[in-house]
Amino acid sequence: MTRPTRRTLAVLIAGATLVAAGIGAPAAAAPAAADGLTLVAVRQSLLGAHEWYQQTYAGLPVVGGFYGKHIDARTGAVLVQDGRIAVQAAPATRPTIAVDRARAAAEARTGGTARRADLVILPGARATLAWRVVSDTGRGSQQAMVDAATGTVLRVDSLVKEATGTGRVFDPNPVVTLQNESLGDNRDRDSAAFAGAYRTVSLTQLDDTGFLTGTYATNVSKKPVNSAAHSYLFNRSQDGFEQVMGYYHLTRAQEYIQTLGLTGVNSSAQHYRTTGFAGDNSFYDPGTDLITYGTGGVDDAEDAEVIWHEYGHAIQDDQVPGFGSTLESGSIGEGFGDYWAYTMSVPVSADTATTPLACIADWDSVSYTSGTPHCLRRVDGTKVYPGDVAGEVHADGEIWSRALFDIQASLGRTQADTVILEAQFSFAPNTTFAAAAQRTVAAAQALFGAAAANACTAAFHARGIL
Ligand SMILES: [Ca+2]
Ligand SMILES: [Ca+2]
Ligand SMILES: [Ca+2]
Ligand SMILES: [Zn+2]
């Protein structure tokens, strides 16, 4: 029998510290299950056998810690992959938080139903005993780590396999990016004038089909673009460009909402299409839960602020089925859509005299406005209730959007958007301005206290609503 060649291979995991003693240890000495390793799988391949072990600490799995042994069938040579992680600071091994409480905490965070829970050791600068809770959600399984001493949710990870692609977009639109109010559609032609407005971005949450379908957005345009390499680089004259715009900006809006801790605000994949409707208009259809972006004038989906306005309607319809059935509730729908376009634009728009941030759809509106700045509408208008009510939802929506604009000026973007989205869950489908304002003040009070509530009251008071 030939003497086995002993080789070791250390596999580095990002952020993991490898146990020094593990590297170079005699590979022939099989790791004992009682000694911090549990055999979890044995696989036979054409060239040999492969044993996989889970690292354990006091019998509990150490998250990310592994040990693999590969035995060459012909030579008997053994190759070890030692991915054990140092367990620092002697973590507790018995929970103080009961499993039911951990499951409830995970369900509250993920919006799902807990399917299984077990105790694990989370390695780190200080290792922590945690409940690992896997929940079913509308967007696949989510794994939450709940501190077994405090009940705090330490982290949430999606277990769904996802791809990240590359796309070319405007962000939010070429008028703002180039600070140029004299750009024109020129029948959808691309030109050197637009070169500085293109951004190459990551397309996150994609599934593996090569289509623009993912966790938060699904492209249902005719002739949908497809790329096995997940590369979607078009210019504005190509139909794929608007499809990429829709995927990117809808996904980013939902990812932003998730960062606020709100996991149930239109969190399933939003269907959208950017072809098939030649009007210079876009709409959300609650009957089919579909957003259609028109291609009249500047293609509507070339302007992210139009994309976000329509997403605002989808958000409210998801929060309150049938929302917007009266003049005032419908006006809140339009006002919130404009506000949502505004708040999504804040991180990517310069607020200048040329393109004020309060101006919505700076690019789409070049087709139907003459004065500058070109704006579909603004969110910093001076309309007051009831004297300025015109009886048309878009016009009256400017009363509501200005109130939300003022709330953001007082509370900052994160708190304002958290309050506004939280409050909308309790709006009636036919709410009045006053009732919706009261719900918003109450949400601010409950989430952030009296000063935040007073700021909201002041904003609605200035509009004559409260
Ligand atoms: Ca186009
Ligand atoms: Ca248009
Ligand atoms: Ca704008
Ligand atoms: Zn609208």
Image: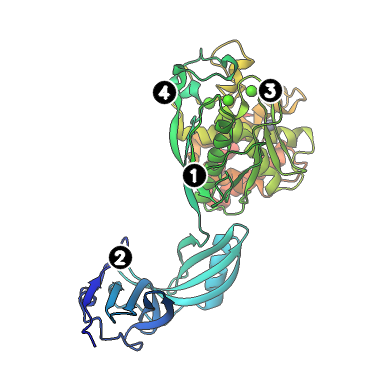
| Residue 441 percent across, percent down from the top left | 61, 44
Q: Amino acid at mark 1?
A: His
Q: How far apart, in angstroms, are the residues tagged by discs 3 and 1?
A: 30 Å
Q: Earlier in the sequence, mark 2 or mark 1?
A: 2
**Judging from the image, what secondary structure is the residue with disc 4 in?**
helix
Of the 4 image quadrants, the one containing the N terminus is bottom left
Q: Is residue 306 above or below residue 442?
A: above
Q: Is residue 257 above or below residue 53?
A: above
Q: Amino acid at mark 2?
A: Ala
Quadrant hosting ligand 1: top right
Q: Is residue 114 above or below residue 42?
A: above
For label 3, the residue is 280
Tell which of 148 and 57 is nearer to you: 57
Tell which of 336 and 416 is nearer to you: 336
For label 2, the residue is 16
Of the numbered discs in the image, which one, if any, rests on residue 230? Answer: 1
Q: Amino acid at mark 3?
A: Asp
Q: Is residue 461 visible?
A: no
Q: Amino acid at mark 4?
A: Gly
